[in-house]
Amino acid sequence: MKNKKYLGLLGLGCGVLLLTGCGGKTLNCEIDMSDMLAGMGNMNAEIEIDYNSDGTEAEKATMTMTVEVTSDDVTDEMIDSLEESLQGECDNEDSGFDSCKVKRDGKKIVMTATGSADSIEGEIEEQTTLEDAKKALEDAGYTCE
């Protein structure tokens, strides 16, 4: 009977480690850039940087940029051009992204890029600590958790 109890606790502990990524830390930041669309809609970016367990080295970063056109004055050609511009960022070999994709649903375009921290945000490098990255992103206008 005791063995089942210990096996259950061991299984629970392993499950927690799998779900939390073995104790790594994550920095989540976002910024509203709707003013860049001059009243044509909403645009925001979210950056998630995964760190090692002590927060001293960035392991992976993901950026999601969402653009949603709300103005009726925007033509389909203008939305196509915006989508092509975001796709151009993905296709740029100098970007350093490990993966990047653009998805469009009507007037909403979402670009998701993953890679090293410096490929997502130029001021953040792999050796930038979580606290230093948070400060740099907040200084750039992001709100971080």
Image (cartoon, rainbow, N blue to C red):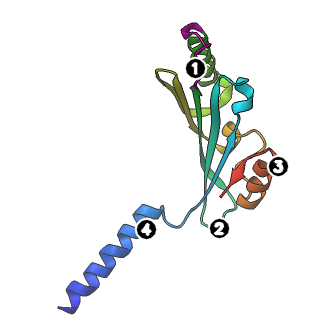
Residue type at mark 2: give it: Asp
- Numbered disc 4: secondary structure: helix
Tag 3: amino acid: Asp
Q: Are marks 4 and 1 in contact (CB under 8 Å)?
A: no
Q: Amino acid at mark 4?
A: Leu
Instruction: Measure the alpha-carbon separation of dots 2 and 3.
Output: 23 Å
Contact between marks 2 and 3 (CB within 8 A): the answer is no
Give the labeled residue for mark 3: 139
Point 78% across, 43% down: residue = 123
Disc 4 packing (10 Å; few <14; some 14–19; many ≥20) = few
Residue pointed to by mark 4: 17
In reply to whether residue 22 is colored magenta, the answer given is no
Tell me where residue 43 sits by quadrant: top right
SS at mark 3?
helix
Label 2 CA crowd tier, 10 Å (few <14, some 14–19, many 20+):
few
Circle nearer the viewer, 3 or 4: 3
Choose mark 2 or mark 3, whichever is in front. 3
**Disc 3 and disc 4: Cα gap in Å?**
33 Å
Residue 94 x/y as whole percent: 68, 25
* Marks 2/4: CA–CA distance: 16 Å
Marked residue nearer the N-terminal end (1 or 2): 2
Residue tagged 1: 87
Q: Which mark is residue 54?
A: 2
Query: Which numbered tag is attached to residue 145?
Result: none
Q: Earlier in the sequence, mark 4 or mark 1?
A: 4
| Residue 20 left/right relative to 95 | left
Which residue occupies 64% across, 37% down?
Answer: 44
Report if residue 72 lies within the magenta region: yes
